[in-house]
Every structure is written in C-alpha cells, then in structure tokens.
Amino acid sequence: MSYFQPTRPNAMPTIIKNLIIINALVFLATIVLEGQGIFLTEYLGMFPIQSDYFRPHQVVTHIFMHGSPMHILFNMFALWMFGSPLENLWGPKRFLMFYMATGLGAAVLYSAVNTYEIYQLQQVYEAGGSAVEYMKALVRPVVGASGAVFGILTAFGILYANSLIYIYFLFPVKAKYVVTGLIIYELYRGFDNNPNDNVAHFAHLGGALIGFIIIKYWQRNRNRFY
C-alpha cells in the first residue's frame, strides 16, 4: 500500500477539523431550531425504511447528527484522537473516503437488522398483539457518527496494534486489545436486545466491519492509491 506520510504530523488534520466543525454546527443548529419548533432530527436523522418519515438522504445526513452534548463530545474526541494518525498516514482524500464508507456501511447493517426486527414486531401486531412497540420502532430515528468512528477505531487497532491506549488516563492497554474488547461488547449488547437500550450497537458493528474489510483490501492491494 502506498501511503502518504507528511514530514511533520498535523495535530489537527484538515478533514478531521472540518468534520468536527460541521458536526458542531449541525448540533448547534439542531438546538437553536428546536426552540423555534423545527426539529432537524425529523429531516436528517435516519428512520427505519418502513417508516413514513424515511427519506434516502437520511442515510448520509444522520452521520452528522447527534442526540446530546456527551454524544457529540465523545464521538468528536474519538475522531480526533484515533483519526488524526490515520489522516496523517493516508492523506485527506483517502481518509475522507474511509470515513464516509464506514459511516454508510454502519447505516446499511443497522438498517438490515432494524428492518428485520420491525418486521417481527409487525407480525406480532398483525397476530393480535400490542401495537405499541411496533409503532415506537417506526418513529425512532438513529443519529450520530459512531459507526464511522468505530471504523476509525478498527483501522487504528489494526495499523497501530501495539500502541498504548490509557483507559481512564491511568491503565495502559494495547490498541488491538481495546478494539477487540469494544467489538465483543457491542456484539453482546446488540444480541442482548435490551428494550431500554437506545444505542445502535449494530451501527457500531457495521462501521467496524467495513473498516476491517477496507483495511484488509488495501493491505492486499499495496500498489493501489486513491
């Protein structure tokens, strides 16, 4: 793989800086417009395919939406911390392509799982069961860059496997173990099917999966450069 390696790593690479700015502006606009009775989540969040609120553009726009201050702070911090070495390594074009591909991959896997779950709820409803959970599922959007961030984490865990990540800023653990642990946790929580859990675990797994596939493809095609 032919990598771009600048002579001096940039602490705030161009693409990451712009992604953080865009996400922050969208989050601010969401809060401001909500006070005016305009709910951006209804237009930009990604609704289930079966929902009347679903629009194709939401597959992209939901990546730039966030549900709370902690949500956006965690995602943007992780994007900067683990994405900066990758953008410095690959250059802006390849990094942006990777980021969007993992974000879209996350959306596809999450939508596939969500579609199946809603279908099951619909079957229960049509068989005479409660319609409450079915109706709730149809109007529950997903927002956030977490899928793309998990793709970034996966790439970092592969390419910087032995780098130390300090858990709670105290306990050093190699990146490959941290990433593996996070993926196992997401798998467990995804299949746990806790009705009180509002985290899109399969979106995280989708981003990680696409990130893994892309990195392995690039490693096998070392003479290709985008």
Image (cartoon, helix red, strand yellow):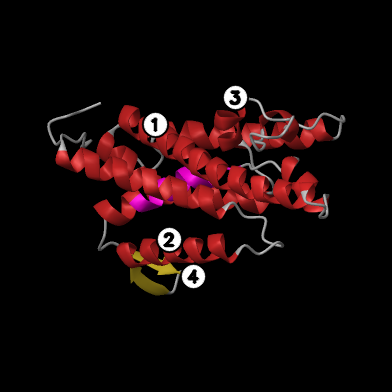
Please report the residue visible at 66 percent of the width from the left and 35 percent of the height from the top. 45
Mark whose residue sits in front, 3 or 1? 3
Q: Secondary structure at mark 4?
A: loop
Dominant secondary structure of the magenta stretch?
helix
Q: Earlier in the sequence, mark 4 or mark 1?
A: 1
Q: Is residue 80 visible?
A: no
User: Is residue 132 highlighted in magenta?
Assistant: no
* Residue type at the position of mark 1: Leu
Location of residue 164 in the rendering, given as x and y in whole percent from the top left corner: 32, 65
Q: Is residue 21 above or below residue 202?
A: above
Please report the residue visible at 72 percent of the width from the left and 31 percent of the height from the top. 29
The residue where tag 2 is placed is 183
| Screen quadrant of the C terminus | top left
Q: CA distance from mark 3 to mark 2?
A: 28 Å
Location of residue 123 in the rendering, given as x and y in whole percent from the top left corner: 71, 48
Mark whose residue sits in front, 1 or 2? 2
* Residue type at the position of mark 4: Tyr
Mark 1–mark 2 CB contact (< 8 Å): no
Q: CA distance from mark 1 to mark 2?
A: 23 Å
Asked if residue 112 lies left or right of residue 92, the reply is right
